[in-house]
Image (cartoon, grey):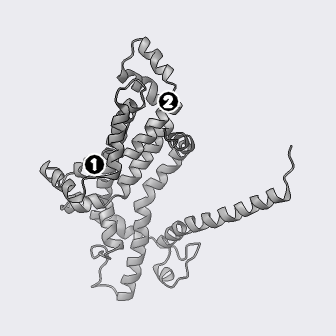
């Protein structure tokens, strides 16, 4: 066993200190929001809440879950996220698989065309006009089809297929009479769980947090995703439906509004926070192998 030198121990100590500082900077805001959402709003406004909840209070959550628009937005966001992620992952697989095959003629040309779109896009107005002409405005497809695939993710998945699955396995399957569809379904995908998990998390988080496409393409409030209501409340301070200014004092109304904001942030991010632990174990293999560009 090699004995650590004083320099190695000092290096480890400095690393632990730096990691602890970074962890605190990243984690504390999330902890504070969670604690503030269940604390007495008056204590939060006075700055008395730091790490532990004070005078536990669930007024914010009661107001959030009593609001029909929030619940409707929640259901819309779940629908858009599930449907969008299925389309995204499916399209990425169908694009990455042929590009990973050595016997696919013209794969370098197709790869160059895909990469070209990463640097030069049609722009917001032409994209809006196309979506409008296709009759997709005010439908969930306006949020899914224009962003059906991300070139960067295609490259990561293609590289994973090339680096992790020997081409000889595919050739053997072909000699046994398997077609491309059967090879993809029976061999490639079962061996690609790490990259599939990573792609699912990437796309689902993007859909869950997206609000700009909905802001442009949706005009009917009953089709709004949760993020648009969150934007109205957090940025525009529009929460008249949840607080009753005519019946309560101004000070209490302000405190109640603060409580609603913190509760809504937790409610909006809870599904993604719950999804992450189930997928994070695939991250190292999926990202490290897939991120080696070839």
Residue 213, horizontal then vertical, whole percent: 27, 58
* Rendered position, 27 above or below 146: below
User: Residue at the location (70% across, 60% down)?
Assistant: 15
The 10 Å Cα crowd at callout 2, few under 14, some 14 to 19, many 20 or more, is: some
Badge number at residue 191 = 2
User: Residue at the location (86% across, 46% down)?
Assistant: 2
Instruction: For residue 86, say whether it is visible.
Output: no
Q: Find the residue positioned furthest to the top.
A: 176
User: Residue at the location (51% across, 28% down)?
Assistant: 165
Q: What element carries label 1?
A: helix
Quadrant location, the N terminus = top right
Task: Determine the image quadrant of residue 174.
Answer: top left
Q: What element carries label 2?
A: helix
Residue matched to label 1? 144
Q: Contact, CB < 8 Å: mark 2 with mark 1?
A: no
* Rendered position, 68 above or below 52: above
Labels 2 and 1: the sequence-earlier one: 1
Front residue of 275/290: it is 290
Residue 267, horizontal then vertical, whole percent: 41, 62
Residue 33, horizontal then vertical, whole percent: 49, 70
User: Residue at the location (39% across, 31% down)?
Assistant: 97
Q: How far apart are marks 2 and 1 (CA)?
A: 27 Å
The 10 Å Cα crowd at callout 1, few under 14, some 14 to 19, many 20 or more, is: many
* Rendered position, 231 above or below 172: below
- From the viewer's perspective, tell me whether residue 49 is left or right of residue 224: right
Badge number at residue 192 = none
């Amino acid at each position: 066993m090699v004995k650590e030198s004083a320099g190695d121990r000092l290096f480890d100590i400095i690393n632990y200190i730096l990691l602890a500082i970074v962890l605190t900077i990243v984690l504390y805001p999330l902890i504070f929001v969670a604690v503030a959402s269940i604390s007495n709003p008056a204590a939060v406004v006075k700055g008395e809440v730091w790490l532990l909840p004070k005078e536990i209070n669930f007024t914010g959550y009661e107001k959030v879950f009593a609001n029909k628009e929030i619940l409707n937005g929640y259901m819309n966001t779940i629908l858009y996220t599930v449907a969008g992620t299925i389309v995204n992952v499916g399209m990425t697989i169908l694009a990455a698989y042929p590009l990973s095959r050595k016997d696919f003629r013209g794969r370098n040309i197709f790869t160059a065309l895909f990469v070209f779109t990463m640097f030069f896009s049609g722009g917001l107005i032409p994209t809006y006009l196309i979506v409008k002409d296709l009759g997709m405005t005010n439908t969930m497809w306006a949020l899914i089809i224009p962003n059906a695939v991300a070139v960067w993710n295609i490259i990561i998945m293609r590289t994973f297929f090339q680096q992790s699955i020997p081409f000889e396995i595919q050739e053997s399957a072909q000699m046994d009479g398997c077609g491309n569809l059967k090879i993809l379904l029976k061999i490639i995908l079962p061996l690609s769980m790490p990259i599939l998990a990573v792609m699912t998390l990437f796309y689902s988080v993007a859909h869950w947090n997206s609000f700009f496409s909905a802001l442009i393409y949706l005009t009917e409030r009953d089709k709004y995703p949760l993020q648009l209501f969150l934007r109205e409340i957090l940025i525009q301070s529009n929460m008249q439906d949840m607080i009753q200014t005519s019946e309560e004092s101004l000070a209490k109304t302000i405190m109640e509004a603060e409580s609603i904001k913190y509760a809504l942030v937790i409610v909006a991010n809870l599904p993604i926070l719950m999804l992450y632990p189930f997928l994070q174990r695939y991250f190292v293999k999926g990202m490290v192998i897939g991120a080696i560009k070839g």
